[in-house]
Image (cartoon, rainbow, N blue to C red):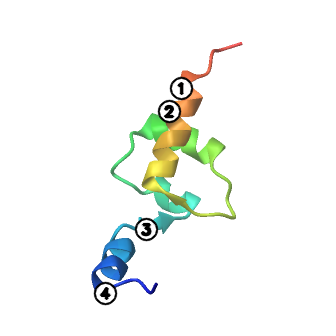
Amino acid sequence: MAPTKKETVTSAASVEPSFAKEQFQDSQQFTNIEKDFLSALLQGERTYTVSEAKNLLADFNAKEAK
């Protein structure tokens, strides 16, 4: 069954934009310390959504120091 027009619009609207590693450095959404962590955690050749970046920060912060 083909998606209806309403389903198509809903799924297109739920797609988050993705950003390059360098764009997170200019973001006002993260603190300077978070930006430092992101520069170490993010891979330069791929893009990330804001949710993915926040999840990476949360996972990193949850790890126990050795």
Q: Nearer the viewer, residue 62 or 45?
A: 62
First in sequence: mark 2 or mark 4?
4
Q: Secondary structure at mark 2?
A: helix
Q: Position of residue 2 (x, y in %)?
A: 44, 87
Residue at 39%, 39% in the rendered image: 31
Residue at 50%, 41% in the rendered image: 55
First in sequence: mark 4 or mark 1?
4
Q: Secondary structure at mark 1?
A: helix
First in sequence: mark 3 or mark 4?
4
Q: Position of residue 45 (x, y in %)?
A: 69, 64
CB contact under 8 Å: marks 1 and 2: yes
Residue at mark 2 to residue at mark 4: CA–CA distance: 37 Å
Label 1: few (<14), some or many (≥20) within 10 Å? few
Residue 50's quadrant in the figure? bottom left
Judging by the rendered image, the residue that carries numbered circle 3 is 17
Q: Secondary structure at mark 4?
A: helix
Amino acid found under the numbered disc labelled 2: Ala
Q: Quadrant of the C terminus?
A: top right
CB contact under 8 Å: marks 4 and 1: no
* Residue furthest left as drawn: 6
Judging by the rendered image, the residue that carries numbered circle 2 is 58
Numbered badge on residue 61: 1
Judging by the rendered image, the residue that carries numbered circle 4 is 5
Label 3: few (<14), some or many (≥20) within 10 Å? few
Q: Nearer the viewer, residue 27 or 3?
A: 3
Residue at mark 3 to residue at mark 4: CA–CA distance: 22 Å
Residue at mark 3 to residue at mark 1: CA–CA distance: 24 Å
Numbered badge on residue 12: none
Amino acid found under the numbered disc labelled 1: Asn
First in sequence: mark 3 or mark 1?
3
Report the side of 17 relative to 39 (left or right).
left
CB contact under 8 Å: marks 2 and 4: no
